[in-house]
Amino acid sequence: MKIKNHIPSVLVAALISTLTACGGGDGASNSAANTASPATPAAIGTGNGDTSTTSTGSTATNTNTNTNTPTTVPAATPTTTPATTVTPIDISAPILANQNVVLNGDSVVDIPAGTTTYGGIISGTGTLTVRAPGGSGTLVLTADSSFTLPASRQTETATQTKSPTDPNHVHYWVIHNPNPPAVIVNAGATLQLGTPSSTGGSIGSYIPNTAGTTINLDNFQIDGTLVLESGPTLNMGILSGSGVIRRPPIGATGGTVRFVGDNPFSGVYSQLYGGYFGVDHVIFSMPNATIFSNESFITAAPESLFGDTTAHLLKYPKTIWESHYGDDINTNSGLVMFTGIYSYSNSGDQLKPALSDPSLNTMLVQNVSGSLTGGTNSSFRGINIEGGTTQWGDGTTNQFFLPSAPSPAASNSAVKNAYINLHRGSTLVFDYNGKYSCNVGITGGGGGPDADGSSGTGNLTIAATAGNYAVLTMPQNYNGITTIGAGATLQIGNGAPVSAVQATVGAPTAAAPYGAILRQTMLATYTGDSSLLTAESANGSLSDAIVDNGTLIIANTSTAITLSNIGGSGVIKQAGAASTTLSGANSYSGGTTVSAGTLNVASATALGSGSVINGATLATAGSQHALNVGGNYTQTAIGNLALSIGSVPDQLKVGGRALLSGGLTLNFAAAPAHGSRFVVVQAAGGVSGAFTSISGNVGGTGLALTGGQDATSYYVTAP
C-alpha cells in the first residue's frame, strides 16, 4: 500500500498496550483528512464455476511503502493461566493523531465527546471496536479502510447458483455461516462512514463476483449508532446489534448503500436518502429491524429458479414508517413480502416512530406551523412495483399494508394520499384472512417519478387463502391478469360512498405529545365504485383477463362497467345497483348470481359454463340474441328476465333445467302480428314453474301477452 505525503503508519501487534508512532503526524484530534491510498485487499476466490460453488474469505495481505519504517515491538507473551484472556489493543492514540493503522489483533478506539474526523487508513488483520468512555462521541472516517478477521475466525462462505440456460451466468448468491463482527460500535458511540463531501469512508474486505454485486466480509455489530454517509457505493457486511443505523441526506457525492445476507439487526434503521435492501443476485433479510424511511426504500430478491420461489422470499414482518410527503417503497425482483403496514408516523422522532391514532393513515394529514413535519399531505405514501412479485400479507391477518384515504389512479388528482404504480409485468399479491379495502387505483403513472397518468402493466392476485376478501373502492388502471384464488373474494366497488378527509394536527403538547387532531375537513366524496381494464376499455388490451377461481362480486352503485375474458372455476355475483355487462369469451365454470341491479349479456359465452340464479335483472345487450346458460337457470320471485324481440328474437337457452318465477319483460322492435308465438326459454333439462308476470311494450306502449309452456320451452303469444 503506497502512503502519500509521508503520513506515518502504526503497526498494531496483539497484546501490545504501548504503541510507537513513526513520526510525521501532528497528533491533533479532529484533523483534516489525509490523502493516503487505501490498501488493496488480496484477491479472494470465487469458486470453480460449477452450478453450485462456494467462495470463502481468506486473510487479505496489505503492504505499506513508506519512507518512515514503523518500529516493530515484539508481541508480549500472555501469562499461562487456566483461562487466558486476551486484552484488546488500544489504538486510540494513532487514530486521534490521524495516523494509518495496521491491525494485528482485536483493537479498540476510545473517542472523546464531540466529533473526531479520521482521514487515515485502517488495514491489517483483526477487529475494530469503537467506544465512547464519556458516554457519547462520534468517529468520522473519510478514507476507505480494508482489514480482515484472522483466518481462524473466518467462517463465512457464499454459495452461487447459476442459470440453467447460461452456465456462465451467476444467478444468485447465498451467504452461509457469517463471520463474527469485524466492526463493533458500543452503546453511546457513533461511527460515521464518510461525509457529504467525501467519496471515501467505507470499511470492507470484499468478495468480487460475476453477479454484479460485491459481498463484504467485514460484518458490523451496532449497539451504538452507525451513520452511512459514504459515496458513491457502500456495500455493507451483515449487520447485528440493537442500536441505530442512520442514512442521512447525501451531499454532492450522491451514493448508494446496499445490504445483503441475513441481518439479525434488531434496532432502528432510519433513512433520509434511498438505500438498496437486498439485490436481485444475493439473498437478503432484515426481519427484526424497525424501519423509518423518509425517502425511496428500494428492495429486491433474486428471481426464482426452477419455479422455486420460497427459497428466495424476502419478508418484512414489521411496520415501515414515514412522516412526510414524497416517500415511496420500490420493489424490483424476486418475491418480496410485507406483512406489517406502511404507516405514517407522527411521533416527531425518526428513531422512535409511532402513530397516535391509526385513523390518520386514512386521512390527508395537514400539520400546522411549528408542528411535526410541515407540509400539506404528510401521510402521502407511494408504491412502485418494478418487477418480480410483491406480496402484502401472509394470510394471518386482515391488516392491509397500505391503509389510505381514497386515492384515484389519475396522477393529477387534487385529493390523494397514496399511489400504486405497477410496471414491467410485475405482480401484486394480496394475502389476508379477512375483509379489507384497497382505496387506491393501481396504475402506471400515478405518482412519484412516473406521474404521467399512463396505465400500469402487471397483474393483481388475490391469494387462495380462505376468507381473503379484497374490496376495490377506486377504478383500476392496469393492463394484465387479475386472479382470484380458491376460497378468496374480490369485490369491485364498495357498495357505498367513500370520503377523503383532511386532518389538521396541532403542535405537540404535554397533554398530546404527538399533537392533537384539531379538526377534520371533508375534501371529496367518491362513489366507491371501481372497475378493471378490459379489451372494451379505452385503455384496455386484448390480453387483459380475469382468472376467477374464487368469488368475483360487482357492487357498484352508480357506475356501469364491462368485464370480459373471464376464466377459472369460480363464481360471479352481480350485487350492485349499477349495471354490469359481461362480454367476450368467458369460460368460468362456478356459476353466476344476480342479486341487485342488471347483468347484461353481450356475447354467446358471457355467462361461462355454470348455472345462473337470477334474483334481479338478467338481460341481453347489443346484438347478442342468445342468452346461453351452460348449467341450470333459476329465477326467483323477485327476478326478471329482459329480452328484445326484433327480426331475430332473443332467447334464453339453458343446457340444464329451467326453474321459472318472477317477471318476464319483452321489448318489441315493432308491433307483432296477431297470434304470433315467440319461444323465449328453451331448456334441455326441462322447464318447471312459470313467470308470474309478463310485460311487453312497443315503443313504450304496453302490450298484453300470454305465456305458455311445454316440457322443454316457455313461449309467449301476441294478442
Image (cartoon, grey):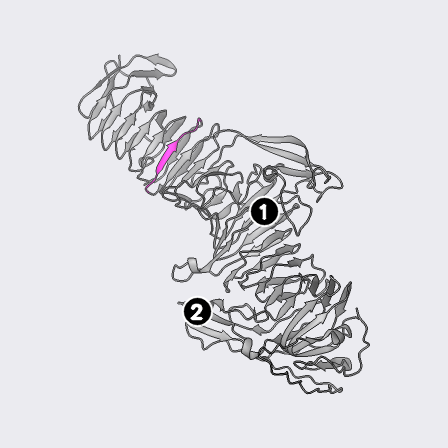
Picture quarter with the C terminus: top left
Q: Is residue 6 visible?
A: yes
Position above or below: 404 against 670: below
User: What element does badge 2 sit on?
Assistant: strand
Residue shown at the point (48%, 41%) measured from the top left: 398
**Residue stretch in magenta:** 569-577
Instruction: Give the spatial CA distance, label 2 vs label 1.
Output: 34 Å
Q: Is residue 622 visible?
A: no
Residue extending farthest front:
82
Residue 129 screen position, x and y as percent: 66, 70
**Residue 173 in magenta?**
no
- Say which label, 2 or 1, has the lower sequence index: 2
Residue 123 screen position, x and y as percent: 66, 77
Q: Which residue corresponds to mark 1?
A: 382
Residue shown at the point (28%, 21%) measured from the top left: 661
Q: Going by the image, does 154 lie left or right of 697? A: right
Q: Going by the image, does 233 lie left or right of 31? A: left
Residue 410 screen position, x and y as percent: 57, 40
**192 or 714: nearer the eye?**
192
Q: Which residue corresponds to mark 2?
A: 162
